Image: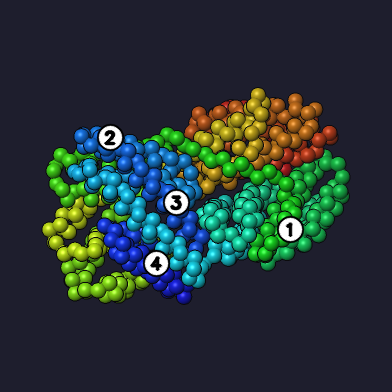
Amino acid sequence: MNLPTASDWLYSGKAFLAAVLAFYIALLISLPNPYWSFATVYIVSHPLTGATRSKAAYRAMGTLIGAAMALAIVPTFASSPMMLVLAVGIWSAVALYLALLDNKPSTYIFLLASYTTPMIAVPSILAPGNVFDLAVARSEEILLGIVCASVVSTVLFPSRVSPVFGERLATLMNDAAHWVAWRLADPKRRGRPTLRLLSDITALDGLITHLAYDASRKAQTEEARQIRFRMTMLVPQVASLGDAIRAMPECDDARRCRAVLDEVLAWVGEGADATPEQGDRLRLAIADLRAGLGTPTLETLALANAVDRFGDVVDLWQDCAALRIAFGRPEHAPTPLAYRAVMPDGRRHYDHVLMAHAAIAPAMAFVLAGWAWLYSGWPGGGGGVVMVAVATAFFAASDTPAPLVGRFLLWEAISVAVALVYVFYILPQVTTFTGVALALAPPLIVVGLYTGRPSFNMGVLLLTSQSISDMVLRNSSAADFEVFANSSLGIILGLIFAVAWSAVARPFGVEIAARRLARANWRDQRRLARRDRSPASRAALSAMIDRTAQWLPRLALLSGAGPLNLDALRDLRVCVALIELRHRVTAHPRMTAAVDRVLDASATYFDDCIDEHAALLPPRELLAAIDDGMRAVLDDAPGVASTLLRYRLALLALPPAAPKSPVPSDQPLTVIPQ
């Protein structure tokens, strides 16, 4: 574990200063629960100023929505506590479902709203007349914490998102350069390095969202999106290039191609230091290669396809290099881009069945815990009901929430122990505000040093915010062990129930989600292959890229290839090839008949994958249709023939263990270099 850096110390000090400031103001204006302001600062604070602003905005909106719903629900069902709990549970399910509709940080709005309403409604069940005061007080105290966190983060040594994104991009380009060399050294390679690179590319999304709140100039956010898209497309294009290289025959033209490839690899190997100007020179060399090949024949089609793939990789890498340089500059003219593919429209893939289940299960946990609490008549159990809502909602997006809720329980137990020491041994010795601040400073500053480290995120959040909440710092309060013990026991029991419920209600794990994503991929590929449908290319590509992003963490958890022979990169390549094929046919209407057989056979193949619940090897009928199509269109539309070859190679990029197609055929494969 790396030791904290100077920036870690600066952030932790700023967060503590903002928390103390919020606490002091809350005490000064006599807010009833000033600890909410203190804890809120730690909940919304982030080492990056832009991230703090975005989290602050989302938390403010989520709090107000949750409070408004509590004000609507509690008076309506005040006479029936059981129905009140059910109504809050239904709202929580709706809010969680809305939160799961997006994977961006902005989903925090509805996630927070889903458990803010129980936080206000549960204490109001026994005293419905206090709900308005409680909702207003919580809103005021949380907004105060948000304002203090945002102001301190912005005014005192702000840490901008732009430089961090620039550094992350430079690291990513260096990693991509190593991956390209690794992948092309043996085009059959697949596995963890590819998944890791795709995961790192996907991780840019969070920074891009925060960048919108902290960009140095307006164009930066769009440049970041363009970089993210091009880095994503680089992966399938390099994989296609690897297959194209393998398919090249041994001849003089192939040797010339390999010489140009060596130059391309040397330039890409420079990583973040690559200059865009070198791309212009390489593009001229590729144009000379293409001209030297003349009109492609069936024997030279593999070479022409390889040359086209050279061009795609050069265009993408040049764009990434140019955008990286432009991103760090002040205001300038728009950067000309070489890769002309249309940006995806941002459409996401939604698995509404799993999303509904993930939203309903936490709501049911809250309702059952609430009813059990009301039936027991135990006043101290209300805090446990609230924690059931918080813990189950917080991990609703996970396929396996039970272990995460278990970690939540562990850190909450540590927080209770810390609060116990402070409430009964340290704070009774302190009589001034300055003394309280000094007493809290050592643990909070030390814990705050580890903010932003994934393995410590939950611990930092709970040890800072929940320990303060457990201390219940008020204007004047005497320590009462019975009250403290009742509240703490209720919270621990509530979280134990949450762990058990998560294990029982959501036992499926990652495989079922991965299986459903694979079937969604095949359905989209079937739609792209349907001749009676217009190719919704941007929507299909957007959904495929989003499914790839959802797939990656799940594939990393599956052992080996899994029962489905899942390959996120292969599906992305097939989608890109189908989209390009449909567009090329649109530009060459006379080639439609030759490609129709390929599309019909493709639709049948994807139907078979769906029916068999597995990625099958392409049947001989499909490969033969592609071979016949290449012969038919080669003379009049060599670009269509090259795309057909690209599609063929992508289809065959399955692991050797892939199950055979259920469609029998005795027709031999046409000999095409592989």
Percent across and percent down for residue 388 are 27, 47
Q: Residue at label 2? A: 76
Q: Nearer the viewer, mark 4 or mark 1?
A: 4
Label 1 sits on a secondary structure element that is loop
Q: Nearer the viewer, mark 4 or mark 2?
A: 2
Crowding near the residue tagged with mark 4, few <14, some 14–19, many ≥20 C-alpha atoms within 10 Å: many
| C-beta proximity under 8 Å, tags 3 and 2 | no
Q: Residue at label 4? A: 18
Q: CA distance from mark 4 to mark 2?
A: 38 Å
Q: Nearer the viewer, residue 503 or 438?
A: 438
Crowding near the residue tagged with mark 3, few <14, some 14–19, many ≥20 C-alpha atoms within 10 Å: many
**Where 159 falls versus 512 (above or below)?**
below
Q: Nearer the viewer, residue 172 or 556?
A: 172
Label 3 sits on a secondary structure element that is helix
Given the image, on which type of amino acid does mark 3 rest?
Answer: Tyr
Q: Residue at label 1? A: 333
Q: Residue at label 3? A: 58
Q: CA distance from mark 3 to mark 2?
A: 27 Å
